[in-house]
Image (cartoon, rainbow, N blue to C red):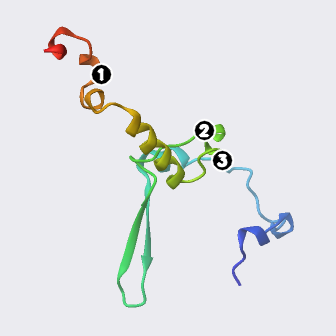
């Protein structure tokens, strides 16, 4: 029988479990940087892959996450912000704005 995370409590840990040599977050940096792939196999032998984390991951600070708890909320807010940026400035690289060459 599989247990849900909410069903697990401290009494589920057996006395013989020994984590004295364990390192918290040992692989966290590598997973954040490189990401990983979840592969789900179907009964017909095919599978689907989902890429998780990696190069396109943005981590929100806890205080920001309170306002934007999911990707949909973040994307909506950023699209709203992008719509406020004048197209002329958005297309011009920041380091050339205001230089004589950029004004021509």
Above or below for 16 versus 20: below
Residue lying farthest to the bottom in this orientation = 44
Residue 54, image x, y percentages: 42, 50
Crowding at dot 3, Cα within 10 Å, few <14 / some 14-19 / many 20+, comes out as few
> Badges 1 and 3: C-beta atoms under 8 Å apart?
no
Q: Label 2 to label 1, Cα distance in Å?
A: 26 Å
Residue 102, image x, y percentages: 18, 16
Query: On the image, numbered disc 1 is attached to which residue?
Result: 94
Above or below for 53 versus 39: above
Look at the image and tell me in which quarter the N terminus lies: bottom right
- The mark lying in front, picked from 2 and 1, is 1
Horizontal side, residue 61 vs residue 97: left or right: right
Query: On the image, numbered disc 3 is attached to which residue?
Result: 24
Crowding at dot 2, Cα within 10 Å, few <14 / some 14-19 / many 20+, comes out as few
Of residues 99 and 61, the one drawn nearer to the viewer in this rendering: 99
Q: Label 2 to label 3, Cα distance in Å?
A: 20 Å
Residue lying farthest to the left in this orientation = 104
Horizontal side, residue 8 vs residue 22: left or right: right
> Badges 2 and 3: C-beta atoms under 8 Å apart?
no
Query: On the image, numbered disc 2 is attached to which residue?
Result: 61
Task: Tell me the residue at 69%/50% (across/down).
Answer: 21
Of residues 34 and 49, the one drawn nearer to the viewer in this rendering: 49
- The mark lying in front, picked from 1 and 3, is 1
Q: Label 1 to label 3, Cα distance in Å?
A: 41 Å
Of residues 25 and 16, the one drawn nearer to the viewer in this rendering: 25
Look at the image and tell me in which quarter the C terminus lies: top left
Task: Tell me the residue at 25%/28% (across/down).
Answer: 88
Residue 81, image x, y percentages: 44, 37
């Amino acid at each position: 029988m599989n247990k849900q995370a909410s069903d697990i409590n401290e009494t589920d840990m057996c006395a013989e479990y020994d984590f004295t040599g364990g390192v918290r977050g040992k692989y966290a940096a590598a997973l954040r940087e490189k990401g990983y792939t979840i592969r789900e196999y179907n009964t017909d032998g095919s599978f689907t892959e989902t890429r998780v984390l990696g190069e396109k991951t943005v981590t929100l600070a806890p205080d920001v996450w309170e306002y934007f708890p999911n990707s949909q909320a973040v994307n909506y807010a950023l699209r709203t912000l992008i719509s406020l940026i004048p197209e002329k400035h958005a297309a011009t690289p920041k380091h050339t704005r205001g230089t004589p060459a950029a004004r021509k």
